[in-house]
């Protein structure tokens, strides 16, 4: 059993208060407001421990570092902003997507990430890549 240190509690609190999954850097930046001497190694170690304990889950976005959120939130989806790179939780679900699977395939679940630009970044669109 892990000790409930100030650092660990700050990380747990930051994840619980976040509007969506956070990267380790976001966890560090927010938790430093509570524990100023917190370091990145402690954040990584604590996140790994929380995942191992089943208290936190990993959220994967292709091409991005893993994000973390409290476990037990139930079925939900995410929105990934391509400008600020934040990940937000999305309420609701389109429902049964089994009809999208090829004939003879059996769908046992799904994971949906909407991709676009969040409200805060609406006017700050990223420039398109150069040809």
Image (spheres, rainbow, N blue to C red):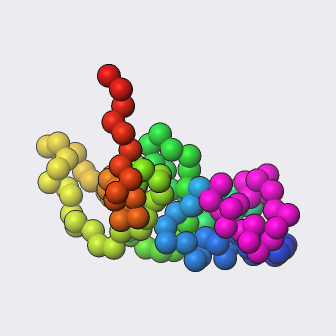
- Judged by its main secondary structure, the magenta piece is helix
- Please identify the residue farthest to the top as the structure is shown: 131
Whether residue 33 appears in this view of the structure is yes
| Left or right position of 49 against 55 | right
Image-based side of 83 in relation to 7, left or right: left
Picture residue at 41% right of the left edge, 68% below the top: 89
In terms of depth relative to the viewer, which is nearer, 66 or 104? 66
Quadrant of the rendering where the N terminus is positioned: bottom right
Closest to the observer, 83 or 61: 83
Question: Which residue: 32% across, 22% down?
Answer: 131
Q: Is any atom of residue 45 visible in this view?
A: no
Q: Locate residue 67 relative to residue 114 in the image: left or right.
A: right
Q: Residue at x 65, y 54 (%)?
A: 25
Residue at 22 percent of width and 65 percent of height: 94
Write the start and end of the magenta stretch as one range: 25-45
Residue 76, quarter of picture: bottom left
**Residue 97 on the magenta span:** no
Residue 50 appears at what percent x and percent y?
68, 65
Task: Point out residue 130 in the picture as x, y percentages from the top left corner.
Answer: 35, 26
In percent of width and height, residue 106 lies at 24, 51
What is the tally of numbered marks visible in this picture? 0
Farthest front residue?
A: 123
Q: Is residue 44 magenta?
A: yes
Q: x, y (%) of residue 30?
A: 67, 67
């Amino acid at each position: 059993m892990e000790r409930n240190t100030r650092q660990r509690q700050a990380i747990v609190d930051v994840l619980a208060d976040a509007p969506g999954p956070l990267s380790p850097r976001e966890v560090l930046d927010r938790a430093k407001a509570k524990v100023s001497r917190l370091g990145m190694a402690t954040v990584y170690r604590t996140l790994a421990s929380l995942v191992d304990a089943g208290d936190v889950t990993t959220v994967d976005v292709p091409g991005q570092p893993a994000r973390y959120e409290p476990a037990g939130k139930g079925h939900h989806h995410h929105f990934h902003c391509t400008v600020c790179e934040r990940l937000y939780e999305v309420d609701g679900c389109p429902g049964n997507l089994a009809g999208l699977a090829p004939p003879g395939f059996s769908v046992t679940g799904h994971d949906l990430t909407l991709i676009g630009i969040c409200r805060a970044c609406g006017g700050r669109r990223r420039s398109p890549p150069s040809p």
